[in-house]
């Protein structure tokens, strides 16, 4: 990938990006109360007295939320801080009944880590870049305000109030919208593998604050702006692009960048100023007197580590090294945890049904999944989670190909019928008489007829036009409605042509 630069009148500008990602923690209950966290409930149906900040209510940390944040930290090779503490970040807003957010400023739960991104979709092993993660801290989410429900009314829904968030703060290590996109996708994949956040950006369970500055190549870091709460990868990339251009324009016309908080408007793809940037001291942070510091034991951290699944990069390497898949295919299969799960279920079924090792059936299974199944799901507008064909049924189809009962061409037709009717591959092949013809006698007769009907082409072939070989194969296959064993057809034609 080429380096991303903005050409201005005074020279070339480089973009510097740091992302603060808010990821909602997967946990049945909130960070400091027992209220439920499920998405989509009736407004204010999931609010405990703690979340509503009734006088005298005391927060109690939820072990599961802490565990999820630690597991996330371990998944990005981060330092886990055995001592951490909660602080109050004080401000007034109608969606924050406490008048402060409980967060972690001075002693976050998770310290320095990193995430590896790849800038080459075709080969995830090429152009790998490490993006630093400065910290992950745990904090409460606020409620939600709904304005203009009536001309003069605003409503507050406190269901989200007190839900646990991880704030994952990157280093300013990204240099293009594409790098920021790759970072977000990789982070989302890791969170989903770990199961600590569902990564659902449309429902707001993952959102990014986008810090952008520009500088002349080799200069010190420039002043940044922070665009708040951007809720899709595409919007993050668009916000960066727009913001970088805007800053270059300001600087080139002799202006200064104000360190400020901005808003992204998805309709126009532009950002606009919201407020000047506040500093930590504006919030009067202080240690929350209602909460003791968190002190983690080694065994708690060890349990968290033990509970981690195989992560995307490790899985990709295993697919390449143990299963012999190409880096590209291994990358596609491991990019989302659902895909990897489906593939592994298919692989296990294929190995059983064909009585072979997983390494032997891997290529067939991988190719079928990434081309045939993905193609079909795309057409049907469905995801893997509601695929009309499951791994066991798919494995039956692939076993029929592998034992020579049907050809790859016929397998495509059978798969279409499986999608249409919901029937199994074996039943369709039997019912429709699709079994492949490997009987040399029957094929030989057809080959002889094709060659006799095309005597002119046979002569041309013999005179050196070897490309005609494929024509003879095609004609024979067509005459046999695709049911001839292609290998046998090839051999017999070769023999017949001398
Ligand atoms: P704050 O706590 O005030 O938001 P931080 O120093 O914690 O500030 O940084 C927040 C985010 O801004 C981090 O993701 C960091 O990488 C990013 N950042 C810091 N300086 C710059 C800069 N000059 N350009 C772009 N991003 C930056
Ligand atoms: Mg910040």
Image (spheres, rainbow, N blue to C red):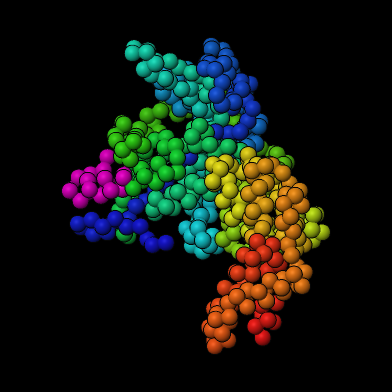
Quarter of the image with the C terminus in it: bottom right
**Residue 348 in view (yes/no):** no
Q: Quadrant of residue 275?
A: top left
Q: Residue furthest left?
A: 253
Residue in the image at 53% along x and 51% along y: 115
Q: Foreground: 440 or 402? A: 440
Quarter of the image with the N terminus in it: bottom left
* In this rendering, position of residue 392 left or right of residue 165: right
Q: Quadrant of residue 485?
A: bottom right
Q: Position of residue 316 (x, y in %)?
A: 62, 57
Q: Is residue 496 magenta?
A: no
* In this rendering, position of residue 7 left or right of residue 324: left
Q: Position of residue 9 (x, y in %)?
A: 19, 57
- Picture layout, residue 15 above or below residue 66: below
Residue in the image at 39% along x and 31% along y: 281
Q: Position of residue 147 (x, y in %)?
A: 38, 19
How many numbered marks are there?
0
- Picture layout, residue 106 above or below residue 459: above
Q: Which residue range is magenta in the image?
A: 242-261
């Amino acid at each position: 990938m080429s380096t991303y630069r903005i050409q201005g009148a005074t020279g070339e500008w480089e973009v510097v990006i740091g992302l603060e990602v808010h990821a909602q923690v997967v946990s049945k209950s909130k960070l400091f109360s027992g209220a439920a966290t499920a998405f989509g409930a009736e407004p204010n149906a999931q609010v405990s007295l703690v979340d509503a900040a009734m006088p005298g209510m005391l927060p109690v940390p939820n072990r599961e939320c802490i565990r999820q944040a630690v597991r996330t930290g371990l998944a990005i090779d981060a330092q886990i801080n055995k001592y951490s503490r909660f602080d109050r970040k004080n401000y007034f807003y109608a969606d924050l009944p406490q008048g402060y957010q409980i967060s972690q400023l001075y002693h976050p739960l998770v310290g320095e880590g990193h995430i590896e991104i790849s800038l080459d979709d075709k080969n995830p092993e090429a152009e790998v870049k490490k993006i630093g993660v400065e910290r992950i801290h745990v904090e409460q989410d606020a409620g939600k305000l709904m304005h203009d429900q009536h001309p003069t009314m605003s409503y507050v829904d406190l269901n989200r109030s007190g839900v646990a968030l991880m704030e994952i703060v990157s280093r300013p290590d990204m240099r293009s919208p594409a790098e920021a996109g790759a970072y977000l996708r990789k982070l989302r994949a890791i969170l989903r593998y770990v199961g600590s956040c569902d990564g659902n950006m449309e429902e707001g369970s993952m959102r990014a604050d986008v810090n952008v500055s520009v500088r002349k190549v080799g200069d010190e870091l420039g002043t940044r702006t922070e665009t708040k709460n951007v809720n899709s990868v595409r919007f993050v990339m668009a916000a960066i692009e727009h913001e970088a251009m805007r800053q270059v324009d300001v600087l080139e016309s002799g202006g200064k960048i104000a360190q400020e908080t901005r808003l992204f408007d998805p309709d126009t793809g532009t950002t606009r100023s919201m407020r000047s940037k506040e500093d930590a001291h504006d919030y009067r942070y202080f240690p929350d007197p209602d909460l003791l510091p968190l002190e983690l034991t080694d065994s708690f951290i060890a349990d968290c580590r033990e509970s981690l699944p195989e992560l995307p990069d490790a899985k990709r390497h295993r697919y390449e090294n143990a299963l012999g898949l190409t880096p590209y295919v291994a990358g596609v299969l491991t990019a989302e945890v659902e895909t990897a799960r489906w593939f592994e279920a298919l692989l296990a079924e294929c190995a059983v049904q064909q009585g072979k090792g997983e390494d032997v059936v891997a290529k067939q299974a991988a190719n079928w999944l990434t081309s045939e199944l993905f193609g079909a799901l795309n057409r049907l507008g469905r995801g893997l989670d509601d695929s009309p064909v499951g791994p066991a049924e798919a494995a039956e189809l692939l076993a029929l190909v592998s034992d020579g009962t049907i050809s790859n061409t016929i397998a495509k037709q059978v798969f279409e019928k499986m999608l249409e009717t919901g029937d199994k591959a074996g039943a369709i092949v039997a019912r429709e008489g699709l079994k492949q013809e490997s009987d040399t006698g029957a094929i030989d007769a057809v080959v002889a007829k094709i060659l006799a009907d095309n005597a002119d082409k046979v002569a041309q072939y013999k005179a050196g036009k070897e490309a005609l070989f494929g024509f003879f194969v095609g004609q024979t296959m067509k005459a046999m409605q695709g049911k001839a064993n292609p290998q046998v057809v090839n051999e017999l034609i070769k023999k017949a042509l001398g």
